[in-house]
Image (cartoon, grey):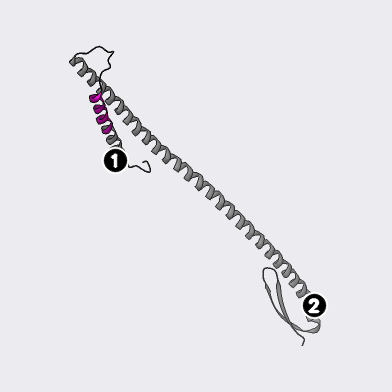
Amino acid sequence: MCPRWSRHSLVSYILERYEASIKYMVRLESKGKPPENQKKLSDKDMVATKIQAWWRGTLVRRALLHAALSACIIQCWWRLILSKILEKRRRAALEAFSREEWAAVTLQSQARMWRIRRRYCQVLNAVRIIQAYWRCRSCASRGFIKGQYRVTANQLHLQLEILLG
């Protein structure tokens, strides 16, 4: 439907204008005087001419009414189609944006995971080296080692207690 008019109000408005124009035309025809240079027509011919003019005017006004209503229907249909097209474009842009955001978040997450895993592997390798050297040393000295470590995003916290017995 047209945004400003409902179908009923538009039709009633056009019909009111149509009836007003008919009344105006009848009023003009009743006031009109035949030109001086024309022949005097008989009363029957004048009445027939007026009826023909009224009928032709009625047909023209009816055609104009039909054209106006058809134009309104076409315009409303086109606005509906256009709004659907714009909604599809907006949805496609939103989906593309969300896919890009999801890809960026996933990539950042993978990069953080890779960094933390690399750091963890470095710490694990260092612990193995320390354990290997310490086991050799503890066998010789019969000492005891107790330790804890904690890995955060960018740091290694290592706490070792060495008891020599």
In this rendering, the answer to whether 3 lies above or below 74 is below
N-terminal-most mark, 1 or 2: 1
Dot 1 alpha-carbon crowd within 10 angstroms: few under 14, some 14 to 19, many 20 or more:
few
Q: Residue at x 79, y 75 (%)?
A: 133
**Left or right: residue 157 compared with residue 13:** right
Residue 14 position, x and y percent, is: 30, 35
Residue corresponding to mark 1? 8
Q: Residue at x 71, y 66 (%)?
A: 119
Q: Residue at x 26, y 30 (%)?
A: 24
Most distant residue in the left direction: 44
- Whether residues under marks 1 and 2 lie with C-beta atoms below 8 angstroms apart, the answer is no
Quadrant placement of the C terminus:
bottom right
Q: Which residues are magenta?
A: 20-35
Q: Main secondary structure of the magenta part?
A: helix
**Left or right: residue 35 compared with residue 165:** left
Q: Nearer the viewer, residue 69 or 38?
A: 38
Q: Amino acid at mark 1?
A: His
Residue corresponding to mark 2? 136
Q: Nearer the viewer, residue 131 or 110?
A: 110
Magenta highlight on residue 22: yes
Magenta highlight on residue 49: no
Disc 1 element: helix
Q: Residue at x 60, y 54 (%)?
A: 103
Residue 123 position, x and y percent, is: 72, 70
